[in-house]
Amino acid sequence: MMDNTGTWVAVGPAGAVGSIRRAPDGFQVELYGRRGRGGTYPSLESAKGAVHAALGPLADRPEFRAH
């Protein structure tokens, strides 16, 4: 089921780590405190995967909260 919101915040154990925004060409990822990391992805699931991957190999998958 597709969520109709336009923004999702990624929340990990230490708080918010990034966000995903719906864009005309896909889903744009912003990673908090990490310059030059992010980008636009074709699907919400691929954007969520990119946020998780950017956290490092041992990081738990963050919770994505629609806003």
Image: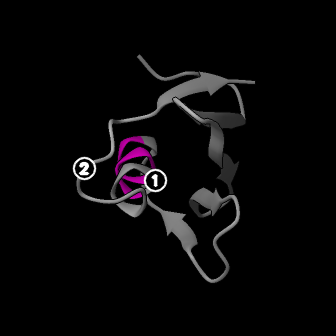
Q: Find numbered disc 1 in the image and state the secondary structure of the residue it sits on.
A: helix
- Residue sitting at the far front: 14
**Nearer to the camera, 35 or 64:** 35
Residue in view at x 71 percent, y 37 percent: 7
52 and 28: which is toward the camera: 52
Q: Nearer the viewer, residue 8 or 36?
A: 36
Q: Residue 53 appears at what percent x and percent y?
A: 33, 58
Callout 2 environment at 10 Å: few (<14), some (14 to 19), or many (20+)? Answer: few
- Which residue reaches farthest left? 57
Viewer-side label of 2, 1: 2
Which numbered disc, 2 or 1, marks the residue that appears first in the sequence?
1
Tag 2–tag 1 contact (CB < 8 Å): no
State how far apart marks 2 and 1 are (Cα). Answer: 13 Å
User: Residue drawn at (35%, 36%), measured in percent from left and top?
Assistant: 61
The way the protein has been coloured in the rendering is one colour
Say what secondary structure mark 2 lies in: loop
Give the quarter of the figure containing the C terminus: top right
Displayed quadrant of residue 25: bottom right
Tell me where the magenta segment starts and ends, as one range: 45-50
Q: If the image is split into quadrants, where does the N terminus sit?
A: top left
Most common secondary structure along the magenta stretch: helix
Q: Amino acid at mark 2?
A: Leu
Residue 16 coordinates in the image, percent (x, y) = 67, 38
Three-letter residue code for mark 1: Val
Judge from the rendering whether residue 65 lies leftward or rightward of residue 62; answer left or right: right
Q: Which residue is mark 2?
A: 58
Q: Residue furthest bottom?
A: 36
